[in-house]
Image (tube, coloured by chain):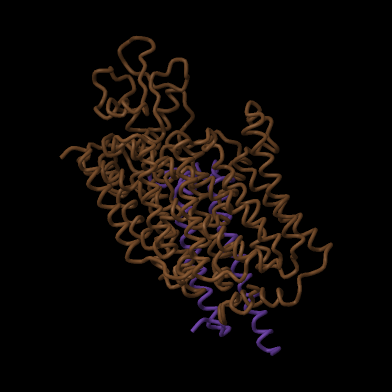
Chain colours: A purple, B brown
Amino acid sequence: MPKSKENQKSYWRKNLQTLAILLTIWFIVSFGCGILFVEELNQIRIGGYKLGFWFAQQGSIFMFILLIFAYVYRMNQLDKEFDVDEE
Amino acid sequence: MEILTWTYILVGFTFALYIGIAVWSRAASTKEFYTAGGGVSPLANGMATAADWMSAASFISMAGIIAFAGYDGSVYLMGWTGGYVLLALLLAPYLRKFGKFTVPDFVGDRYYSKGAKVVAVICALFVSFTYVAGQMRGVGIVFSRYLEVPIEWGVIIGMCIVFFYAVLGGMKGITYTQVAQYCVLIFAYMVPAIFISMQLTGNPIPQFGLGGELADGTPLLDKLDGVLSELGFHEYTDGRKGMVDVLMITLALMVGTAGLPHVIVRFFTVPRVKDARLSAGYALVFIAILYTTAPAVAAFGIYNTIDSTSETSIEDLPQWISTWQMTDLIQVDDKNGDGKIQYLADPETNELNIDRDIMVLASPEIAQLPNWVVGLVAAGAMAAALSTAAGLLLVISTSVSRDLFKTYQPDLSEKKELRIARISAACAVVIAGYFGVNPPGFVAQVVAFAFGLAAASFFPVIIMGIFSTRINKEGAIVGMISGMLFTAAYIVYFKFISPELNSSENWLFGISPEGIGSIGMFINFLVCGIVSHLTPPPPQSVRDMIEEIRVPRGEEKSSKFKKD
């Protein structure tokens, strides 16, 4: 079945694209904002928080949750689009 | 009522609850014993995963570690939650589609090799035993502090409870008790946190309270920065660790989390691939409730401690200081004889020593909450330790019965396999209990081991097993062994052979033993890739299997592709 093989290939390519985008954000919010640029971000304040410190101890965790749910949403869409979802 | 009475009532009630659930949900088949029959709802599995994951260390010690480390404590917060993103995006859905019972199962099938499987089993056993010894110790400590029984008896009581529901119920029993344990532990963690947040900052939500203002209008964190630097400590929101080290520790903890067998195996228990994805999301929500509260508990705790003790005369110390002095978790020594307490960074003149576990254990007393809250915290700490211990014991018993016995004795009957699984769970409980009573002096040091080894061994081979069709068994075996040996050698060298050299100037690129698993992981990836490309590609049947686990629809791969 070459057609379904083709379909599977493009499904996988879309999947990898999704992963690349989400993992880039994952890297930026934790390693970027929480560690590499923490000093710079600490110059900015939100309420009683310095922004870099907030990312390191709170913000990155909230972002992780959003990332997983974004992934769930996107993959359910892709599963339907490429007709590979579970009935 | 007295604190002790409340503690007995609440701990006793929760134990009865766990046993009741275990009897109601005991396992009848190997499939139920290993993966709860694969019929757990994503929400329940998310809760169970959260309880499985959050150990005695998360509940009792983490806030204290952050309280004394300040910004540097962030490595644990980001490391132990960020791993779930990797787990959800890169591992859980595919392993669910693969559909077998254990991580070594996957490694053995994907790399068509008993050798690879055995290496994976050894890693799984090592990681799990390291971890479980700490949990049993945790149970013993909670018993001895709150119920005034000797630590040994505490461990034995804990063993009996875990024995009962892990051996009887298998994964099915464990899953539903973990759901109950999650509810107990999160309630116990949040109640004192909410009250303390309200008292200090007027905001009932600790996550906001941490960024809130004290009664005099200064933000809590600024006040802490100021007070701590006055006393000679580093600023709370500033770190002392090198940036490379912080990066590497965070990465090792994230990747290690995603590679821990007792966490991965939880995603085999949900019915579908889409449930596995969703379940990882729920798990992180449930974990994040505690993990975003912990830094608040940490800051409140250290602020309260300094505020109520520093430059206070010894007679005026709050009640909880003297209560906890009896357990040696707090030591007061008026060195300069001025009748007041000086809490200082310099160990020569410092007069107050506080164990980090105090931040959570004494939190109800610090906030002057009613006695039942103290009992609740005890029950919560116990729930955290027991749920993690049970999950680990299951991995150990499954590894022995399924990955060792069944591999070499494929005609083993289901009934016999189930009996072997139960016997090995029972043996594992006894061994874990032994280490709980007689902890090897190095328990604290070996935590770095568990994560480092999981990061350097499992994670790369599972990832490449899914995302590459070219990686073969030669690459996987050599990769796992080299990653593991490098990481183990580095940790053993700095922790056991030459602990006196364990400081940043001697470390490789300034990376501490806690973070070295990241380098081990890169080595594993690299070696695995090179060796695979120099040796023949995997057989067509394996490549077909990889193509199939990448799409959600279709039969579970293991039912078509099996050698047993």
Q: Residue furthest top?
A: B337
Number of numbered discs on residues = 0
Q: Identify the residue shown where x is 47% and y is 35%.
A: B438
**Of the pair B207 and B187, the residue shown nearer to us:** B187
In the rendered image, residue B14, in percent from the top left (x then y), is placed at 28, 52
In the rendered image, residue B358, in percent from the top left (x then y), is placed at 36, 34
For the C terminus of chain B, the quadrant is bottom right
Q: Residue furthest left?
A: B1
Q: On screen, A4 above or below B73?
A: below
**Of the pair B78 and B320, the residue shown nearer to us:** B320
Q: Identify the residue shown where x is 39% and y is 45%.
A: B59
In the rendered image, residue B517, in percent from the top left (x then y), is placed at 64, 46
In the rendered image, residue B64, in percent from the top left (x then y), is placed at 41, 37
Q: In screen coordinates, is B217 left or right of B53?
A: left
For the N terminus of chain B, the quadrant is top left
**Of the pair B347 and B218, the residue shown nearer to us:** B347
Q: Identify the residue shown where x is 82% and y is 68%.
A: B536
Q: In screen coordinates, is B523 left or right of B350?
A: right
